[in-house]
Image: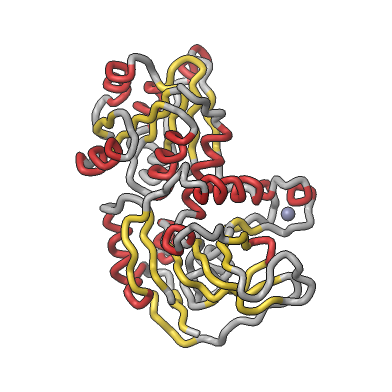
């Protein structure tokens, strides 16, 4: 089969499209012939050694959907010919956290494509518990691309206990997680506001259900209060130090600031009296459980949530797709059609 392999960690130029042996599923595993796969910023970070894969060459890629074409011993949940979506949340499956369904707390927790070979290939072998049947009405491009980002955004909003009628501020809209947070927030009945440095992205977000948008580099906390009439109940923040101060100011009394990443750097300052006088909650969140993934698949299949797909490239055009992702110009997911 053909696979995009990363040969060193000098960046996106280190990928090449290679002929590699087609993997065979072991006990409890299935092989999926992939139809559509999608990129995440994780793929760019891994290509730069953040984190470095355990072995090189390495196949990146967390998202994909396809058809089961080989089944390992003992697999009963899916069969040959089943159309499936790949769930990129990997865990040991046997520890206390896994048995309780809290796989994100498993000590062996990992994201597909980070250390284990991922979806940037014509086929992938993964545990059978990591595929879920693709609902019949769901098109391949959406099925193969929404998984990681929408699952991540869904767990964030659940952990932040977002309720209908609340004010949700999504900081730095445009990427996969933040655009999914906009779509999910609307489906949950929240009033959604966004920030971006790009007027085009703000215009796009308001055309997709945001009430208003503000410049990420300005005093968006003041603008939010003026336009929404009150501060945010929930702030989705994955930018970090560049926006953190304004994000904290945007949250009202009892506000919840939920964080799944920190793209502008790893450290922020927090003024303690603000934290306790406003009784804020700062909530970390990463990835999602199998149950949460199944709920997200149902939400997307029902049409209540339509995570945006920005652009679909040919499988051979990975370098152009990665460059597009790296440019930050995209609105939603960047996908590749494999077959
Ligand atoms: Zn475990």
The image's colouring method is secondary structure
Q: Nearer the viewer, residue 185 or 239?
A: 185
Measured as percent of width and height from the top left, residue 303 is found at 46, 46
Quadrant containing the C terminus in the rendered view: bottom left
Residue 326: x %, y % from top left: 31, 58
Dividing the image into four equal quarters, which quarter contains ligand 1? bottom right
| Vertical arrangement, residue 285 with respect to residue 69, above or below | above
In this rendering, position of residue 133 left or right of residue 185: right
Answer yes or no: is residue 265 visible. Answer: no
Establish if 82 lies above or below 254.
below
User: Which residue is rendered at x = 79% and y = 57% of the image?
Assistant: 94
Residue 23 to residue 126: above or below: below
- Residue depicted at x 50% and y 58%: 137
Q: Can the viewer see residue 62 in this picture?
A: yes
Given the current orientation, which residue lies at the most extreme left position? Answer: 199
Q: Nearer the viewer, residue 164 or 179?
A: 164
Side of 232 where 31 appears, left or right: right
Residue 21 position in % (x across, y down): 56, 87
Name the residue located 35 percent from the left edge and 68 percent from the top edge.
Answer: 12
What's the residue at 44%, 28% (across, down)?
Answer: 190
In the image as oriented, which residue stretches furthest toward the top?
Answer: 277
Residue, far front: 137
Closer to us: 270 or 23: 23
In percent of width and height, residue 17 lies at 40, 81
Foreground residue, 78 or 180?
Answer: 78
Left or right of 338: which side holds 322? left
- Number of numbered discs visible in the structure rendering: 0
């Amino acid at each position: 089969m053909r696979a995009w392999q990363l040969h060193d960690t000098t960046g996106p130029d280190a990928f090449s499209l290679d002929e590699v042996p087609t993997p065979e599923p072991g006990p409890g595993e299935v092989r999926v012939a992939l139809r559509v796969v999608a990129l995440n910023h994780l793929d760019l970070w891994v290509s730069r050694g953040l984190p470095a894969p355990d072995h090189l060459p390495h196949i990146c890629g967390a998202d994909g959907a396809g058809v089961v074409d080989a089944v390992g011993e003992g697999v009963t949940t899916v069969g040959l010919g089943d159309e499936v979506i790949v769930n990129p949340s990997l865990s040991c499956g046997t520890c206390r956290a896994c048995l309780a369904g809290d796989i994100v707390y498993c000590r062996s927790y990992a994201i597909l494509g980070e250390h284990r070979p991922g979806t940037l290939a014509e086929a992938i072998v993964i545990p059978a518990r990591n595929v879920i049947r693709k609902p019949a009405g769901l098109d391949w491009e959406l099925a193969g691309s929404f998984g990681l980002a929408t699952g991540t955004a869904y767990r964030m909003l659940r952990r932040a206990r977002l309720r209908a009628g609340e004010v949700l501020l999504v900081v730095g809209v445009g990427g996969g997680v933040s655009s999914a947070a906009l779509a999910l927030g609307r489906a949950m009945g929240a009033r959604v506001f966004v920030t971006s440095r790009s007027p085009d992205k703000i215009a796009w977000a308001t055309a997709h259900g945001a009430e208003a948008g503000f410049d990420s580099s300005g005093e968006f906390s003041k603008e939010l209060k003026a336009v929404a009439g009150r501060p945010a109940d929930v702030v989705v923040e994955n930018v970090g130090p560049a926006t953190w101060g304004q994000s904290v100011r945007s949250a009202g009394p009892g506000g919840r600031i939920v964080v799944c990443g920190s793209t502008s750097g790893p450290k922020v300052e927090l003024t303690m009296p603000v934290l306790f006088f406003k009784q804020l909650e700062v909530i970390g969140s990463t990835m999602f459980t199998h149950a949460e993934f199944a709920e997200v698949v149902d939400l997307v299949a029902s049409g209540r949530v339509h995570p945006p797909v920005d652009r679909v490239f040919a499988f051979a055009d990975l370098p152009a797709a990665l460059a597009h992702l790296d440019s930050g110009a995209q609105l939603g997911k960047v996908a590749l059609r494999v077959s």
